[in-house]
Image (cartoon, coloured by chain):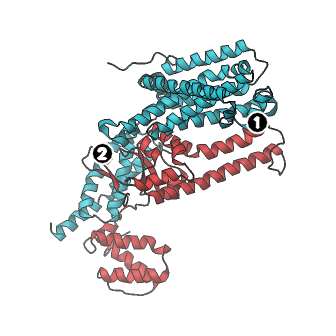
């Protein structure tokens, strides 16, 4: 193409600068939610085509110009605005809890079974270890807790005299949430990190149970954990299952490639973690307000523990928010 | 190890690829540091103001006993600001934070669109892993060794950090383009940009640049004062008899 002709084409392209400015302004308004004008939305599709067309010409005619830079940015912004799904919070949350989370639970069923088995085995191992060698409790419990049990008192006794229940709840639930999320993230290490978290938590619980049993505090310990423990342990298994799915996606990626497979598994299993976090908030409140309170009888604790566990089952099955829609076979 | 940052090219319905320059570890670290300062300042500001209100005097010390009100009013919100800063702001500002905005980067999904809420939550939860063992060691290493400079959270969420190109300036106005027979497209850009940057340039430097531009585009230098050079550039851009 001759220089003269190219220059004429470039000149004609630059004549359209005002159209680009208008298109970009519209795109910004729509992206920032500052307009509800239907005309703006409908003209956006025309703007997108206009910017694409002119960008293609600018790439050829003015490759190193600021016009091209500007058009690249305007086109990318228009693309992002057009390809942004609407955020309808209510509908999204309803779909998440009614349809998505139950579907994830169904998908993770074998992983949940395996992670539960690993947790139980680790608990058994921890119990057997400390039952046979009580001095090994030092590996799993703090010196203060050990000293308290050796004096014949659970470390949780009188806890509410030192720490208010609200503070205790926040401390417990934030710690549990971090552990649960970490068990999921640690699936990135081909599932080994999740296995470690499940194993360690199982060993600690089994060891603590054996140690309090050796000192005649088993019933008190069970009384302490019954209200919050059912859901807390179940959530540990759920987040372990989600982590295992992430690990398997990396270890056996299939045709889509390792990173894509990891991304899909993380996004899909991550939905379950939202339910886990909510359940752990409830469990933390129970552990702060109910479990250390000596005035609450065992019957009430069992009722709370069982009810909360059933609530968890309803939440995970989607029944809490209406009948879940099963995908067509 | 990855070389220079590639562009993310996304196929579009129009047949013209969207090209997004991927931000490297430097831009990421810069944005993170800016955000870190913002959230530390915000958390400390909350702590200080709330503690002063709580104590009712110029004292920041906590009560001697564990006080639920102190914890709920002073400590918890300050910690929430610090730890939930990225998560909350990325959701509210659709993939941006004040630090990212200042660094000129934003988060996008792999299709170039805005990331979903689930993706933003996922990328933030994975900070637990990326921040290990200290100072985001894992995340920083991942951004250095991966081709698209992704930390683990980005891989999990399917997101990338790209340059915003917010400073991309619009091309010359129609009036400026009337000088096209005299100036080619590149010339219009150069002169228009020089005029735009005129107030920010050193007097000597802008005089030198103006003389060079006038000489290059065949305009005789009719005066050598600062004002005269500025006027001559404007005339060159407008063309004979043109307006601005």
- Quadrant of the rendering where the C terminus of chain A is positioned: top left
User: Residue A46: which disc?
Assistant: 2
SS state under label 1: helix
Q: Nearer the N terminus, badge 2 or badge 1?
A: 2
Residue indicated by mark 1:
A144
Is residue A101 shown to the viewer in this render?
no
Q: Chain of mark 2?
A: A
Q: Is residue B79 left or right of residue A296?
A: left
Name the spot of residue A164 as percent of width and height, x first.
77, 32
Q: Which chain is red?
A: B
Name the spot of residue A297 as percent of width and height, x first.
75, 14
Q: Which chain is cyan?
A: A
Q: Is residue B94 above or below residue A230?
A: below
Q: Is residue B237 left or right of residue B90?
A: left
SS state under label 2: helix
Instruction: Please tell me which residue is depicted at 83% across the width and 39% down the height of the picture.
Output: B65
Q: Are marks 2 and 1 on the same chain?
A: yes
Q: Residues within 10 Å of mark 2 (few under 14, many from 20)?
A: few
Name the spot of residue B36 as percent of width and height, x first.
59, 53
Q: Is residue A305 above or below residue B69?
A: above
Q: In front here: A93 or A156?
A: A156
């Amino acid at each position: 193409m001759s220089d003269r002709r190219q220059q004429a084409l470039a000149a004609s392209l630059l004549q359209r600068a005002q159209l680009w400015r208008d298109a970009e302004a519209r795109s910004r308004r729509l992206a920032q939610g500052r307009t509800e004008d239907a005309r703006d939305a409908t003209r956006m599709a025309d703007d997108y085509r206009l910017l694409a067309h002119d960008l293609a010409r600018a790439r050829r005619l003015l490759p190193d110009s600021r016009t091209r830079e500007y058009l690249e940015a305007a086109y990318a912004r228009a693309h992002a605005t057009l390809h942004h799904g609407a955020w309808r919070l209510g509908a999204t949350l309803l779909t998440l809890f009614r349809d998505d989370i139950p579907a994830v639970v169904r998908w993770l069923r074998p992983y949940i079974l395996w992670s539960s088995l690993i947790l139980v085995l680790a608990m058994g191992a921890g119990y057997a270890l400390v039952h046979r060698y009580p001095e090994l409790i030092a590996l799993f419990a703090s010196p203060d807790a050990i000293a308290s049990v050796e004096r014949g008192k659970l470390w949780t006794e009188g806890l509410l005299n030192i720490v208010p229940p609200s503070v205790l709840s926040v401390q417990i639930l934030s710690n549990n949430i971090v552990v649960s999320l970490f068990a999921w993230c640690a699936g990135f290490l081909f599932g080994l990190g999740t296995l470690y978290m499940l194993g360690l938590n199982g060993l600690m619980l089994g060891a603590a149970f054996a140690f309090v049993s050796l000192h005649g505090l088993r019933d008190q310990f069970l009384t302490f954990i019954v209200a919050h423990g059912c859901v807390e342990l179940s959530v540990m298994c759920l987040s372990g299952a989600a982590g295992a799915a992430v690990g398997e996606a990396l270890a056996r990626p299939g045709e889509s490639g390792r990173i894509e497979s990891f991304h899909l598994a993380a996004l899909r299993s991550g939905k379950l973690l939202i339910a886990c976090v909510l359940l752990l908030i409830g469990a933390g409140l129970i552990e702060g307000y109910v479990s250390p309170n000596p005035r609450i009888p065992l019957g009430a604790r069992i009722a709370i523990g069982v009810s909360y566990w059933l609530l968890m089952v309803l939440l995970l099955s989607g029944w809490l928010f209406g009948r879940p829609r099963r995908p067509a076979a | 190890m990855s070389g220079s940052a590639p562009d993310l090219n996304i196929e579009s319905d129009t047949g013209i690829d969207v090209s997004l320059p991927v931000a490297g570890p430097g831009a990421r670290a810069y944005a993170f540091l800016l955000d870190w300062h913002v959230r530390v300042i915000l958390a400390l500001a909350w702590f200080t103001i709330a503690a002063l209100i709580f104590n009712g005097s110029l004292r920041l010390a906590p009560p001697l006993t564990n006080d639920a009100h102190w914890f709920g009013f002073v400590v918890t919100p300050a910690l929430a600001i610090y730890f939930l800063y990225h998560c909350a702001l990325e959701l509210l500002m659709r993939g941006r934070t004040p630090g990212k905005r200042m660094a000129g980067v934003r988060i996008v999904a792999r299709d170039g669109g805005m990331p979903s809420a689930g993706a933003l939550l996922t990328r933030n939860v994975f900070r637990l892993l990326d921040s290990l063992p200290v100072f985001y060691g894992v995340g920083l290493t991942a951004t250095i060794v991966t081709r698209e400079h992704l930390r683990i959270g980005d891989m999990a969420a399917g997101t990338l950090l790209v340059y915003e190109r917010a400073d991309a300036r619009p091309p010359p106005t129609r009036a400026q383009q009337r000088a096209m027979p005299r100036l080619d497209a590149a010339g219009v850009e150069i002169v228009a940009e020089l005029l735009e940057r005129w107030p920010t340039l050193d007097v000597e430097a802008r005089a030198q640049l103006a003389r060079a531009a006038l000489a290059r585009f065949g305009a005789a230098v009719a005066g050598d004062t600062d004002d005269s050079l500025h006027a001559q550039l404007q005339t060159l851009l407008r063309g004979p008899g043109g307006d601005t």
